[in-house]
Image (cartoon, rainbow, N blue to C red):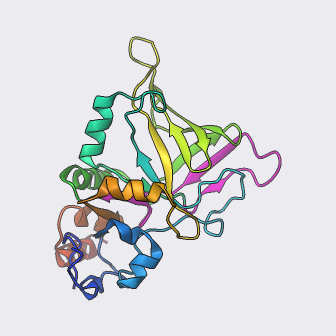
Amino acid sequence: ETLPGNILSSTQQPHQFRGCDGEERPCAVKNFDAEHVLPSSASAVGLGKTFEIATRENMNTSIPVDFTGLWWIRCLDDPVVCGTSRSFCSLYRSLRLEEGLTFAGMTSNTTGEPWFLAQLSAQTNMQHRWMFSNSLAGRIAMIAVGFTGASENKLNMVFYNRTNGRIGSGSETIIWPIDKIDEDQWLRKTIWTDIGGVPVSNMNYILTRIVNADGTPHPVLYQKWLKHVHGWQVRVFNTNDDCMRKCGSLTHLRGVCKQRCSESS
């Protein structure tokens, strides 16, 4: 049996991970080496499903805004590209709070021309859809999400056209505009409007596609991501059972979590 808190090293045998899937209450958390976000790589070592790559088939909209694949939450310290302070980006990268997401299952309120103004939603909290790391900060972030965000919660967006939109922040004083840079990169800004009444923008990142819809790595950006996560592992929720997610984010003792969640259900 594989315990969800264990760190699977490249020298361990893949069979140690089997037993985590296909049960009534599977392991709440999966750890795996970064290259196993690729379906072919995960399959080759018997890891089962590690991450859900967004495709046109599993996205419930045909809107002409391409969010297929797997996306890296990429904080740069280039003020020309990002307008972000070097100190913030250096800190953010070192913490390894979150490493990526998928828009699998995304829906839209429009089904044809005119496509815009469009409201888009994606259940990014669900299993295999948001990547954390096994750093201390990444583990704490995962605990926070497990206890504060139900698996069915949605990331909501509004798009004004094919290249400009806004992501819902859940706050009236924080605005998250998102603007297209190219086919594989979107600039997501953070604007605080409550700092002396003056808009401030200094916490931006570039949403960067690292895996294509067909599961193949981006020829350039995937390698940049691997370099960024070198020495760390990826952690994902492996179940949509909210009780197991809460418990499993705290402890690797799956038997304890299964008993506790069985008693509470």
Residue 164, percent from left and from top: 64, 37
Image quadrant where residue 252 sits: bottom left
Residue 193, percent from left and from top: 45, 20
Q: Is residue 181 left or right of residue 235?
A: right
Residue 42, percent from left and from top: 39, 77
Residue 160, percent from left and from top: 69, 36
Q: Is residue 149 left or right of residue 217?
A: left
In magenta stretch: residue 151:
no
The residue under the point 24% across, 45% down is: 95
The residue under the point 30% across, 86% down is: 18
In magenta stretch: residue 114:
yes
The residue under the point 28% across, 84% down is: 14
The quadrant of the picture occupied by the C terminus is: bottom left
Picture mark count: 0
* Relative to 214, residue 23 above or below: below
The quadrant of the picture occupied by the N terminus is: bottom left
Relative depth, front residue between 252 and 188? 188
* Relative to 26, residue 188 above or below: above
Magenta stretch prevailing secondary structure? loop
Residue 150 in sight: no
Task: Give the magenta-colored segment's residue range.
Answer: 104-132
Image quadrant where residue 10 sits: bottom left
Relative depth, front residue between 226 and 120? 226
Residue 259 in sight: yes
